[in-house]
Amino acid sequence: MAPGTENEHHDHHHAHGASHHRNRRALRRSLMVTLALLAVEAVGGWLANSLALLSDAAHMASDAAALGLSLFALWFARRPAPADKTYGYHRTEVLAALANATGLLVLAGLILHEAYERVLAPPEVAGPLMLAVAAAGLVANAASAWMLHSGDVRGNLNLRGAFLHVVGDLAGSVGAILAAAVISLTGWTLVDPLVSGLIALMIIVSGWRLMRDTLNVLMEGTPAGLSYAEVEQALREQPGVANVHDLHIWTITSGFPALSCHLVMTPEATSQHLLQQVRAMLEERFGLRHVTIQVEGEHQVDRACAICGPSLPQQS
C-alpha cells in the first residue's frame, strides 16, 4: 500500500445507541416533572409574594425550555448525514448546550436585578405557604435530578446542560425552604431576596462552566482530559515514525473526539504496518477511534498547511 490517507470511520450512532435512548428517556421524564412543578411554584410564589419561589419558578420555566431543546437536539442529531454535512448534525447537541448556558446566565442576571429591588424595599412574604410550596419543589427537583443523572451526564454536554438547570432548581428549593423557615420564625423578609441572590450566583457558576466547555468544542479545542503534548509525544515515540506534523485533536460532539495528523516514516518502515500500530495505540491509550492519518516518506513532507497546531521540538 502506497503512503496516503487512511480513515477509520466508526458508526457513532451504533456505539452510542444505548446511551442515546437512556438520555432521551431521562430527559422526557424530567420534563414532565418540571412542567408539573412549574405550575405549582408559579401559583404558590405569586400567592406567597416570594421572590425565592418566583425565581425558582422562572428557573423551572427555563428548565422546561432547556429540557425540550435538549430532547429536540438528541432527536435532530440522529438524522442521517447529508452530502453537504459530512459529520451530520452531531453539533446540534453542542449548540443546545450553549443555548442552555446562555439561558442560565441571562436568568441569573434577571434574578439578581429583582433581588436588588427587593433588598431596597422588602415586601411582605407569606412564610408558611412559601415553605409548603418549596418543600414540594425540593422533592420534585430531587426526583428530576435523579432521573437525569441516570443518563450520560459526564460525557454528554447537552444532557449536562439540562442537568445543571435542574440542579440549580434543587439548590433554589433548598434556599427557598431556608428562607421560608426564617420568615415564619422571625418575620425577617429580607432573607427572601438574599437567598435569591445566592441562588443566582450558583446559577452563574454552573452556566459559565457549561458555556466554557461548549465553546471549547465549537472552537475545535483539544478535548478535556486529553493532552496535545502527550498525544504528540506518543506518536513520535512509535517505532517507524521519524516525525509528526499538522496534528489536530478536536471534538465533533460530546464523547466523539477526532484526530488528524501527518506521520513521516523512517525508510525501513511500511505504511500499512505503521498505520495499524498507531491506530491501535491511539485507541488503547487515549480513546481516540475516529482518526485520519497521512503517512509520508521523508521526501514527501508537505509544509503547505496553513493551519498547524503547536509542535514539540523536531526530532533529528
Image: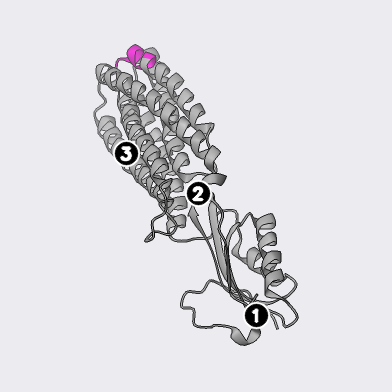
Q: Which of 208 and 80 is in front in this view?
A: 80
Which residue sits at x=71%, y=76%? 270
Residue 105 at least partly seen: yes
Q: Where does the image place residue 279, in percent across and percent down from the top left?
A: 66, 62
Which residue sits at x=54%, y=31%? 150
Identify the residue under disc 3: 107
Element class at badge 3: helix
Q: Earlier in the sequence, mark 1 or mark 2?
A: 2
Mark 2: amino acid: Ser
Q: Where does the image place residue 123, in percent across and percent down from the top left?
A: 25, 23
Identify the residue under disc 1: 314
Q: Do the residues labelled 3 and 2 touch (CB within 8 Å)?
A: no
Element class at badge 2: loop
Identify the residue under disc 2: 254
Q: Quadrant of residue 86?
A: bottom left
Q: Earlier in the sequence, mark 3 or mark 1?
A: 3
Which range is magenta?
126-132
Distance between the alpha carbons at the discs numbered 1 and 2: 33 Å
Report the mark closest to the observer, 1 or 2: 2
